[in-house]
C-alpha cells in the first residue's frame, strides 16, 4: 500500500480525493556497519531508489497529482533536473492527466529522460539551467491552467513528510542526525516538518539535527549567495536559486543543524563506497556520505550518534557517470584459459 493509505491521517484528503497508489514509500532502511565504524557513528541509509520511479519524489507526487485531479486540473507541468519529471509523468499517467516537463538541456541523466518519455509526458529541453526552466514552467502553468508539481506545490512537501514518518517507524524513534542532499531545498524542509508533525502526534519522542549537503559548485545554501552558473557532476542538485531556500534555512536552524558543501570527487568516491555496500545511489544522493566524512575529518561529527542518510535516487538513472569512473569491462576470448588470467 502506498503512502496515502498508510499515512492518510497526515494528509489533506477528502472523500473526493482520488487515492493514486503505485506502492510508493516503504523503502529499505539499511544499516551500514562498515562505513559507520569508519566514521565512528551508527550509520543507516534510507534507500529511496526503491520507490516506483526510483526516487523520493514519488512520495510528494502521489499527493500533488491526486489533489490536481480532485481540483479538476487539465494537466500537470514541472521543471526538473530529472527525477521530478519522471515521477510527475508516472503519476500523471496513472491518473490519466497530461504532463509537460521542462528539462535543462544537456544536463539531465539519460535514464530520467527515458522515464519521462515512456510514461507519456511532453518533454522539452530548455536552453538554460533548472532555475530558468522553473520560471518558464510557473508562467506556463498560469497561462494554461495546469497544476505546477514542483516543490512550490504545497502537497509535494506534505507527501514527502512520509519519509520522516517511515524512518521513525523503522527505528522506533527519530535518529540523532538526518543527513540529506539539498537542491531546490524542498526535501530538507519536508523532512523537518515530518519529524515535527510525528513528534506532535506522539508517534516519536524527538526530532533530529538536520544536516543539508550540497555540491561545491552549486551550494547557495552554504554561501548564502544565489548563483546563475551552478555546476556539478550531481546533476540532480545542479541548482543555483533554490525556491525553498528561506524555509529550508529556518528548518535547519531550528534543528540546530547546518548546510555543508562537498567536492565532486568526494561525491564520486562516496558513490563507489556505497555501491561496495550494495547500495547503488545516484551522485546527488551520495553527498551526505561525502559530507559526513568531511565533518569527521574536521572533528565536527560527534562520536556514537545515530545518523540516517537519505539516499534520494537510484543509481541506475545515471549510468554514464559510473561507466566513466568505476572501472571497465574486461574483453575476453571465448576460453577458460584467458578467463583464468583475469579473475582474482
Ligand atoms: N536528490 C535527488 C536524487 C534529487 O533528484 C533532488 C532534486 C534532490 C536530491 C534535492 O532535493 O530539491 O528537494 O532539495 N531533484 C529535483 C528534480 C530538483 O527536478 O528532480 P530538493
Image (cartoon, rainbow, N blue to C red):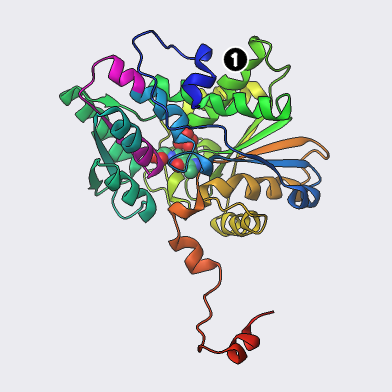
Q: Toward which corner of the image does residue 252 lie, by quadrant?
A: top right
Residue found at x 34% / y 28%:
149
Q: Toward which corner of the image does residue 97 lie, by quadrant?
A: top left
Magenta highlight on residue 77: yes
Residue 343 on image: x %, y %: 65, 80
Residue found at x 72% / y 47%:
32
Q: Is residue 38 left or right of residue 170?
A: right
Residue 184 appears anywhere in the view: no
Residue found at x 72% / y 37%:
307
Residue 106 on image: x %, y %: 31, 55
Outermost residue to the left: 143
Magenta highlight on residue 319: no
Residue 55 on image: x %, y %: 47, 40
How many numbered tags mark residues here? Answer: 1
Depicted 167 relative to depicted 326: above or below? above
- Please identify the quadrant where the C terminus is shown: bottom right
> In this orientation, which residue lies closer to the viewer: 247 or 35?
35
Task: Specify start and end residues of the magenta stretch as a single range.
Answer: 66-87
Depicted 258 relative to depicted 295: above or below? above
> In this orientation, which residue lies closer to the viewer: 266 or 334?
334
Residue 45 on image: x %, y %: 65, 42
Residue underneath mark 1:
197
* Mark 1 Cα shell of 10 Å, populated few (<14), some (14-19), many (≥20): some
Outermost residue to the top: 15
Amino acid at each position: 500500500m502506498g503512502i496515502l493509505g498508510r499515512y492518510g491521517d497526515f494528509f489533506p484528503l477528502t472523500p473526493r480525493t482520488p487515492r493514486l497508489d503505485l506502492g510508493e514509500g516503504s523503502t529499505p532502511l539499511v544499516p551500514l556497519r562498515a562505513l559507520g565504524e569508519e566514521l565512528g557513528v551508527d550509520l543507516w541509509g534510507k534507500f529511496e531508489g526503491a520507490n516506483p520511479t526510483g526516487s523520493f519524489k514519488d512520495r510528494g507526487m502521489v499527493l500533488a497529482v491526486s489533489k490536481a485531479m480532485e481540483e479538476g486540473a487539465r494537466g500537470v507541468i514541472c521543471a526538473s533536473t530529472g527525477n521530478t519529471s519522471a515521477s510527475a509523468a508516472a503519476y500523471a499517467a496513472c491518473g490519466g492527466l497530461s504532463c509537460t516537463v521542462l528539462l535543462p538541456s544537456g544536463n539531465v541523466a539519460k535514464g530520467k529522460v527515458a522515464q519521462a518519455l515512456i510514461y507519456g509526458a511532453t518533454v522539452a529541453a530548455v536552453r538554460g539551467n533548472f532555475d530558468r526552466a522553473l520560471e518558464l514552467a510557473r508562467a506556463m502553468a498560469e497561462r494554461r491552467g495546469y497544476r505546477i508539481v514542483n516543490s512550490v506545490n504545497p502537497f509535494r512537501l506534505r507527501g514527502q513528510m512520509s519519509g520522516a514518518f517511515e524512518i521513525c517507524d523503522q527505528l522506533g524513534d527519530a535518529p540523532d542526525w538526518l543527513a540529506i542532499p539539498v537542491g531546490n531545498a524542498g526535501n530538507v524542509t519536508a523532512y523537518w516538518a515530518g519529524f515535527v508533525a510525528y513528534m506532535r502526534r506522539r508517534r516519536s519522542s524527538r526530532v533530529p539535527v538536520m544536516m543539508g549537503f550540497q555540491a561545491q559548485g552549486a551550494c547557495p545554501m552554504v554561501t548564502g549567495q544565489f548563483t546563475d552558473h551552478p555546476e556539478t557532476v550531481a546533476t540532480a542538485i545542479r541548482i543555483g536559486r533554490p525556491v525553498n531556500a528561506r524555509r529550508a534555512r529556518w528548518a535547519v536552524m531550528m534543528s540546530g543543524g547546518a548546510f555543508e558543501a562537498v567536492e565532486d570527487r568526494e561525491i564520486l568516491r562516496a558513490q563507489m563506497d556505497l555501491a561496495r555496500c550494495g547500495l547503488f545511489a545516484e551522485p546527488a544522493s551520495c553527498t551526505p556520505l561525502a559530507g559526513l566524512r568531511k565533518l569527521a575529518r574536521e572533528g565536527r561529527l560527534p562520536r556514537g550518534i545515530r545518523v540516517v542518510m537519505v539516499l534520494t535516487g537510484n543509481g541506475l538513472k545515471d549510468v554514464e557517470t559510473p561507466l566513466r569512473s568505476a572501472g571497465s569491462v574486461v574483453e575476453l576470448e571465448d576460453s577458460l584459459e584467458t578467463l583464468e588470467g583475469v579473475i582474482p
